[in-house]
Amino acid sequence: MRGYLAVTPEVLGDFLRTGTHNFSTAYATTRYFFEEYPDVDEEEREFELSWLAALDSKEQQGSEICLGFVLAVDLSGKQTGSELANTIELVSELSWTQVESLLVSDNSEAELTWYANQEIEDLLPQWTA
């Protein structure tokens, strides 16, 4: 299952350095989300969930002028718990090896820039400076 994690630059850096992190929830296509948007294709659902995570990231940082950071991760069934409307509870720590990509929102438009997992370490200093 693909999940989207709302992260701050600090959490992103810690996760990258340690290789593991405990997250409480991930945005995911839950049955409730799917039922609410039955006519939306998978790509649109994935974008909507990642956009919600980007907004959550911005809120966590407490600034209206900040970037929103979203990690796209592959979740195993044993890592997931209860489903809510558009999130799923995470019941065990995640490994950096589960990270597929980073999505970044750099303005108020519903747009996200995609970065490969391998690019994150090189780009992180510009986001934490």
Image: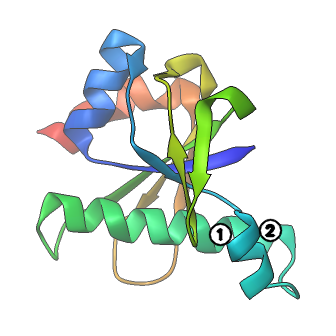
**Horizontal placement of 128 versus 78: left or right?**
left
- In the image: residue 9, left or right of residue 32: left
The C terminus sits in image quarter = top left
The residue lying at 61 percent from left, 30 percent from top is 79
In the rendered structure, are the residues bearing label 2 and label 1 in contact, judged by CB atoms less than 8 Å apart? yes
Locate the N terminus by quadrant.
top right
Crowding at label 1, few (<14), some or many (≥20) Cα neighbours within 10 Å?
A: some
In-front residue for pair 57/126? 57
Pointer 1 residue: 47
Q: Which residue appears at 51% of the width and 70% of the height?
A: 51
Which image quarter: residue 87?
Answer: bottom right
Colouring scheme applied when the structure was drawn: rainbow
Element on which disc 2 rests: helix
Residue 117 found in image quarter: top right
Give the quarter of the image for residue 23. top left
Identify the residue position indicated by label 2 in the image: 43
Identify which amino acid the numbered label 1 is placed on.
Answer: Phe
Please state the horizontal and vertical placement of residue 90, each as a whole percent of the image.
51, 39
User: Is residue 114 shown above or below 101?
Assistant: below
**Is any part of residue 50 visible from this angle?**
yes
- Left or right for 109, reference 47: left
